[in-house]
């Protein structure tokens, strides 16, 4: 079980804990920079972004899936392989979002890909949060705003269907895991999170992501949003994925999956 006790970082006597979930109190930002943050958000021209998925790097997909189901009541399904990346995944569907268990399965191919190197360097036997992705319908606009390169990807689903998407910001997200990368799914593509599944812990949804990083850089990166994230000043990292379930709160962190009391 992984327990998280988070103390806000400080700048002098001023807290640097930023909760960007709209329904929560943003008083922690206080006089340190709320006005600055608000100006950043008001200048955004992005469309509404949504949490698409979170990545957990594992060394053994089958073993990680068994532990996740046994300890947390979360069922995963075989996703597929990424032939050009040297990885494969399993999907934990959560409706409009999902958790992706990802592992390197072809080291020779993975050696030539920055994504696979990211997975290989962060994967662990019990699973470690690697990064996260936000879904947008205006990827080209986002890429232009941030000076990012757009690339395409695909994989073959277990149904035989080909899932296609476009990405931007993978390299930046790998270097600063508090930053998400951006994804736009191909027209008509069924979102992986919408696959029918019966979790023993159902209903389950992502409650929040706990991030360490630079709150102001993340605000400028995302622009206006309603994403369920909490940011603490520190070395860039996705420290935990917090899920709300019928059976209680589930935290997926660096120590592996576990149930816990309410996170702060």
Image: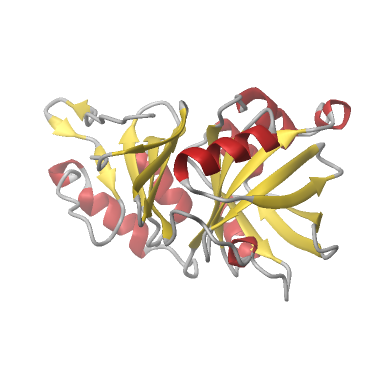
Colouring scheme applied when the structure was drawn:
secondary structure
State whether residue 25 is above or below residue 64: below
- Residue 147, given in percent of the width and then of the height, sits at 62, 50
- Residue 7, given in percent of the width and then of the height, sits at 22, 29
Using residue 185 as the reference point, say whether residue 29 is left or right of it: left
Name the residue furthest bottom: 188
Q: Quarter of the image containing the N terminus?
A: top left
Please report the residue visible at 31 percent of the width from the left and 52 percent of the height from the top.
20
State whether residue 119 is above or below residue 76: above
Q: Which quarter of the picture shows residue 16?
A: top left
Q: Quarter of the image containing the C terminus?
A: top left
Foreground residue, 127 or 122? 127
Please report the residue visible at 55 percent of the width from the left and 61 percent of the height from the top.
198
Please report the residue visible at 72 percent of the width from the left and 52 percent of the height from the top.
79
Foreground residue, 221 or 117? 117
Using residue 11 as the reference point, say whether residue 230 is left or right of it: right
State whether residue 180 is above or below residue 137: above
- Residue 86, given in percent of the width and then of the height, sits at 82, 36
- Residue 262, given in percent of the width and then of the height, sits at 25, 43
The count of marks equals 0
Using residue 253 as the reference point, say whether residue 148 is left or right of it: right
Using residue 246 as the reference point, say whether residue 36 is left or right of it: left
């Amino acid at each position: 079980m992984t327990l998280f006790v988070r103390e806000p970082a400080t700048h002098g006597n001023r807290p640097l804990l930023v909760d960007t979930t709209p329904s929560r109190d943003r008083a922690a930002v206080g006089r340190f920079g709320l006005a600055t943050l608000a100006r950043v958000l008001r200048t955004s021209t992005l469309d509404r972004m949504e949490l698409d998925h979170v990545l957990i790097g594992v060394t053994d997909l089958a073993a990680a899936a068994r532990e996740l189901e046994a300890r947390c009541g979360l069922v995963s399904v075989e996703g597929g392989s990424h032939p050009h990346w040297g990885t494969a995944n399993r999907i934990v569907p959560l409706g409009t979002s999902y958790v992706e268990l990802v592992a390197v399965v072809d080291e020779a191919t993975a050696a030539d890909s920055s994504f696979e190197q990211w997975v290989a360097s962060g994967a662990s036997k019990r699973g470690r949060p690697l990064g996260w992705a936000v879904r947008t319908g205006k990827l080209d606009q986002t890429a232009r705003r941030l000076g990012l390169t757009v690339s395409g990807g695909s994989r073959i689903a277990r149904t035989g269907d080909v899932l296609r998407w476009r990405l931007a910001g993978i390299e930046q997200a790998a270097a600063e895991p508090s930053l998400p990368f951006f994804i736009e799914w191909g027209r008509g593509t069924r979102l992986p999170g919408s696959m029918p599944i019966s979790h023993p812990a159902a209903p389950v949804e992502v409650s929040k992501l706990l991030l360490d990083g630079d709150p102001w850089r993340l605000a400028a990166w995302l622009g206006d949003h309603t994403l369920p994230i909490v940011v603490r000043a520190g070395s860039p990292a996705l420290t935990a994925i917090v899920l709300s379930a019928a059976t209680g709160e589930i935290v997926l962190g660096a120590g592996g999956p576990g149930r816990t009391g309410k996170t702060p």
